[in-house]
Image: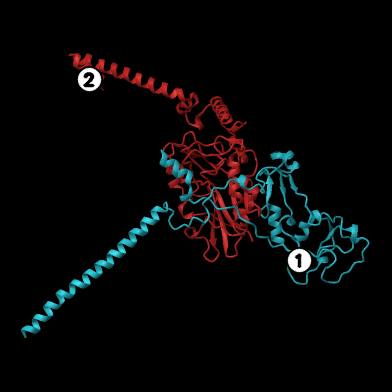
Amino acid sequence: MSDADRGRATHGDGLERSVDRRALLISTGLTAMAAVSASVAGASTGFIERLLRTRFTELSPERKAEILADLEREYGERYARKVMVADTPPMDGVEFAYGLDIARCVGCRRCVYACVHENNQSRDPQIHWIRVLRMEKERGIELAESTAYYEPELVPEPDAFYLPVACQQCRNPACVKVCPVKATWKEPDGIVVIDPDWCIGCRCCMSACPYGARHFNWSEPTISSEELNPNTHYLGNRPRPKGVVEKCTFCIHRVREGRYPACVEICPVGARKFGNLLDENSEMRYLLREKRVFVLKEELNTQPRFYYFYAT
Amino acid sequence: MDELDRQPREKPDSERLLPGSASLAVLLIVFVSLSLLILFSIMRGGVGHVASDAGGTKAYSPADFPEINFDRQLLPEVEAAGSSDPEGIYRVRQSLAYEDYFPCSDCHAEMEVNLERRQLEEMHDDIQLNHGPADRWCFDCHNPDDRDSLRLANGTLIGFDESYRLCGQCHGTIFRDWREGIHGRREGYWNGAKSYLLCAHCHNPHAPRFQAIEPLPPPVRPQFLRATVEEVHDE
């Protein structure tokens, strides 16, 4: 601004003055931009490229491949081992749904830690995508009275039942609606995903989510090289930076390859079910036909893909 | 009359002063104790009502539980068939509770069959029969003539690897759910080959009630996420 003021002082003619001011403004702007880019370029070229790129869903296949290769190299250096980053697309004719039998769940939390193991959550500060709520049989499902910190010698306790809660993969997700930068969206197969490179960490989605399913990396996530799961997906379990939100993706790197999510396979009582809603012979369709099913907080019209049921 | 009038007027003045100071003192004590209480709770680091030994204070990692296999390996058949074989359903071979004894005919072939209900003493005395009616006995399921097979109610002989047919005779609805993949655990490909467990993998046939297990530790309570708190304050 001071440059522009000086320009006005030296020239008398109005037209000439304004042209001169514009030229000066442009030149100062360019100098500033050069200075900023020079200082940023000192840090890392990948960083700038990622700042300037378009959103993930709009990338060309070639650009996507470059970015994945970049990430693989970056993670490979950081963890001193080979890390794969896939971008497996959704399958045609597939919509995922999840079932959880609360008559079977014993609240042992095997799923909680299997999820951490599979999805590279930070170990300390700790992040758990699954939260198992203990409730009194006498009172039924009462979220306000439930606790996640129960710690008896043995489970199940005779007077309690357990309700594990993770992302409900809503068809009408409040978290997606509030995101100011569209860093989170619903994929065609029903999985609500987050692009950690696009997330600005405002945590609007966390306050919008009625299930407490989203978690924030308050500090740099810690995970040792040996504990890292090297089989990752761009929109799922790849290592996350500090300051972004993360959540359950139905193990996107597994289910898009046809595998069951990790929590389904670890459950010692087989309370967890998973399948394709569009396949009439799938476990999920049988479950919805034959069992008493409910969703959490139905009155909010979030329309979860996560069904709780009682199999007797 | 004057005296009577004056006395009541003076007395309340002197009396009013005393109760006033007493209530002031009481108020002061209440205020001081309350502020001390708040001060103490702040000095405890904002932990609030949660005692430091209440659990949820330490961050555990899956690596802290080496006894649990988090890297589950698929059956080789399932792995080979992959997601291309939607009909491929493989039963996991049953690890018999009496693997060391099998085949049962090694001993029982030469033994005389004793159909009588009795307390087993020489062998199998570790079996606690706790499965349905009190008059249930070995030969409701085991075949007295050939111990290497099980016997259905209609006399059909089946192998131990088909034990679900035996269980399904009474537990029809559970059997149906199991067959459809709703009861019990499946591993593998949701759109392809998968493996089942048999009833006896999870339920002891002699005492089928699911045994209580030890839970893994609870999550860290927000107020104990120390690493976070310190880092935020440093910046």
Residue picked out by circle 1? B128
Q: Amino acid at mark 1?
A: Gln
Q: Tag 1's secondary structure?
A: loop
Residue picked out by circle 2? A5
**Colour chosen for chain B:** cyan
Side (left or right) of A284 relative to B45:
right
Question: What x and y, as percent, mark residue B16?
Answer: 18, 73
1 vs 2, front mark: 1
Marks 1 and 2, Cα distance to the nearest angstrom?
97 Å
- Quadrant including the C terminus of chain A: bottom right
In percent of the image, x 52 and y 53: which residue is there? B56
In percent of the image, x 78 and y 52: which residue is there? B95
**Colour chosen for chain A:** red
Q: Does B12 appear above or below A57?
A: below
Question: What x and y, as percent, mark residue B70?
Answer: 65, 45
Instruction: Using a 10 Å C-alpha cutoff, classify the residue at mark 1 as few (fewer than 14 neighbours), some (14 to 19) or many (20 or more).
Output: few
Instruction: Using a 10 Å C-alpha cutoff, classify the residue at mark 2 as few (fewer than 14 neighbours), some (14 to 19) or many (20 or more).
Output: few
Determine which of the numbered discs, if any, sits on residue A136 in the image: none
